[in-house]
Image (cartoon, rainbow, N blue to C red):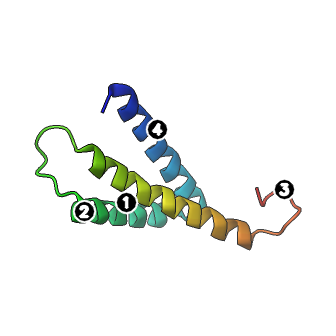
Amino acid sequence: MTAFERWWIWHARTACQIALARCGGTALVDDACTEASWYADLLHPWDGRGCEPDARVYAWLSILVARRDLAERARAARLPAGTGLDR
């Protein structure tokens, strides 16, 4: 994985965490990160030596993105339509 790809992943991870925090606060961010770690550990065990394997990084990120999408849909469903807040 190139340095640019690593930068992009950290940027995407931060964006997901901000979106999760906006929808559900720190508790949701912590829960999503715990789930992502569990998922990455289950599918792609890593001993912590060397660079983290790409598959593990993408698995971790996939959980954050999925949780962000679910949280944003739930948030949109709770907001009144037509107020501009539903975007």
Q: Which mark is residue 33?
A: 1
For marks 1 and 2, give the CA distance: 15 Å
For marks 4 and 3, give the CA distance: 27 Å
Where does the image place residue 12, in percent across and percent down from the top left?
A: 48, 43
Is 19 or 59 nearer to us in this picture? 59
- Identity of the residue drawn at 85% across and 67% down: 81
- For disc 3, the marked residue is 84
**Residue type pointed to by label 4:** His
Where does the image place residue 8, in percent across and percent down from the top left?
A: 44, 35
Q: Which mark is residue 53?
A: none
Task: Count residues near mark 1 (Cα–Cα under 10 Å), then give few for <14, some for 14-19, many for 20+.
Answer: some
First in sequence, mark 3 or 2: give its number: 2
- Numbered disc 2: secondary structure: helix
For marks 4 and 2, give the CA distance: 23 Å
For marks 1 and 4, give the CA distance: 15 Å
**Residue type pointed to by label 2:** Leu
Q: Quadrant of residue 41?
A: bottom left
Q: Which mark is residue 43?
A: 2
Task: Count residues near mark 2 (Cα–Cα under 10 Å), then give few for <14, some for 14-19, many for 20+.
Answer: few
First in sequence, mark 1 or 4: give its number: 4
Above/below status of 74 relative to 5 = below
- For disc 4, the marked residue is 11
- Identity of the residue drawn at 65% across and 66% down: 73
For marks 3 and 2, give the CA distance: 41 Å
